[in-house]
Amino acid sequence: MTILETTSPRSERRASTRQIWLLTVLLSLLLLSALSLRFGLRPISWDNIWESFVAYDATRADHLVIQGMRLPRLLAAWLAGAALAASGALIQSLTRNPLADPGLLGINGGASLGVILCIFLLGISDPASFVWVAMGGGLASTVLVFFLGGAGRGTPLRLILAGAALSALFLALGRSLLLISQRSLDVYRFWVLGGLDGIEMPTLAALLPFFALGAAFAAVSSFNLNAMMLGEDTARSLGLRVGLARGLAVCAIVCLCGATVSMAGPIAFVGLIVPHMARHFSGADMRWCLLFSAFLGAGLMILADLIGRLPVFGGNMQAGVMAALLGGPALVWLIRRNGSTAL
Amino acid sequence: MNAPARLHAKALSVAFAKTPILKDLTADIPDGKITVIVGPNACGKSTLLRSLARLQKPDSGEVLLDGKSIHKQANRSVAQRLAILPQSPSAPEGLTVQDLVTRGRTPHQSALRQWSHQDAEAVGRALELTGMAPYANRPLEALSGGQRQRAWIAMAMAQDTEILLLDEPTTYLDLPHQIELLSLIQSFNQQSNQTVAMVLHDINLAARFADHIIALRAGAIFTKGSPAEVVTRNNMEQVFDLRCQIISDPVHRTPHVIPE
């Protein structure tokens, strides 16, 4: 048919634009990563960076800084940004609510309460031991939210409402404990700001399985969510087991966000903002939206961390705070330019 | 006695909040024919269709697809044989016609095997049959109501099932677009021998396009049969409380209702 012949080049062009954008985003991400290794309180030359990878020498300060501090920090920024943004895309699509944030499932609230309880009851103040407490708190509260929200059978709205209610409850409980105990507050303050300071390779390695599992769940969910975004009836009619698909998406979010919050504390906004940016490149296809979200999220975190290290900000502005400072205006600009792309 | 139809409702009862909607209803959806379910508002038409499509779980009774209870079969395997287009479905903003129609292939795909030659062929065929190929890259919200409905029909066609259920596919369309859409469904039925069952409000359109009409009243089948058997003065008065004259449509020779 002539009609088909005239339209197929258009659709191909559309698909290839998306691929070119993805390539551009990836290249920018690599560039940012390189810059993030190069600059900091102590600028290190490209040669030294290269040598620290190929001929590591533990007696040289430059090598120690790159391998012991900047590389783990860079990887943490990659993982945190990608995980948060991908979870944001998942939850916004799952709940069909453009304002949904992965924190709505109660992960951050549960993780915070876990950390506070750990400081308050056990008197632990070493940030490294917060990892598993935060993870446990986040997991427990998400399981609670999922079952209060109807265990996959309830509406997405019920899920968010259950999450919002429990988050508020956990926040209130945590704050009342902090009011009682000044010592807990002092320790907690550093954790809650959400930063990439002091993350070491062993922590990253321990959390990597959760990120990998989350990524696998997310990949399968992206296929399911493509059908789910046409409404529950249509999704079921297309052969999807809706409850199972919802559960799987929640598992993906829990793994990704749980690992992130236990690594870097609660970081807001990245999960809310980045999926909106991603949709401008990806359109309504969830598989592309997840890819773009992950790469843009990683890029935003690295950029935020890089700028936060500039001397202007005293050299240690938290990446989570800076990400929101950068991401907010960028989103406003995108919306003003193209109009909002809803779900 | 004929072989039983592939899609069969057996003693279905459905209630919402203790209000009975369907009462012990038994019906066959004849294979390869167009069946139209008619009846006054709130008589349970949509509930019957949704039950047939396993979107509504009955309180008692069951729906049989190929001789087995539809709720006991794997959802995906049902979706390869039966498609339903729900009433006024919604799509995310920015979704293109091509993307939408591609989603119709979901039951033939899996997360690991997402695109095949058959998928491309079925999507291309559905776009062509519905005349939506020139609009393939348009987002749905940039289409007129009639085009949008055709895009959804194209999605259901791409699903490539032997049975297609449609819940009020002509809602919000003006008369020319209603005729266009129903003609499209009719020609598709004639070409592919697909079984079609749909809910329609307009009794005259039902009479014109249906092979088989099921008339519901208060959750039970009042009468069923060919348009000539169902669309009679007496039935219209009993089912719709409508006093009318029936004439023969001068063009299509189907019964035509003239309300008094």
Image (cartoon, coloured by chain):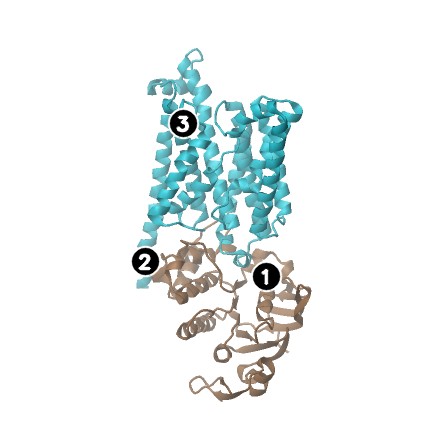
A102 is higher (above) or lower (below) than B212: above
Q: Residue at x 52, y 41 (%)?
A: A102
Residue B84 visible at all: yes
Q: Amino acid at mark 3?
A: Gly
Residue labelled with disc 1: B55
Color used for chain A? cyan
- Using a 10 Å C-alpha cutoff, classify the residue at mark 3 as few (fewer than 14 neighbours), some (14 to 19) or many (20 or more): many
Q: Nearer the viewer, residue A183 or A242?
A: A183
The amino acid marked with disc number 2 is Thr
Q: Nearer the viewer, residue B36 or B69?
A: B36
Kindly indicate whether the residue at mark 2 contacts the one at mark 3 (C-beta within 8 angstroms): no
How crowded pointer 1 is (Cα within 10 Å; few <14, some 14-19, many 20+) is rated as some
Q: Secondary structure at mark 2?
A: helix
Residue A7's mark? 2
Dot placed on the residue nearer the N-terminal end, 3 or 2: 2
Which of the 4 image quarters holds residue A177? top right
Judged from this view, the residue extending furthest toward the front is A179
Separation of disc 1 and disc 2 at Cα? 36 Å
User: Which residue sits furthest top?
Assistant: A59
Compute the Cα span from label 3 to label 1: 52 Å
Q: Position of residue A220 (x, y in %)?
A: 52, 45
Kindly indicate whether the residue at mark 1 contacts the one at mark 3 (C-beta within 8 angstroms). no
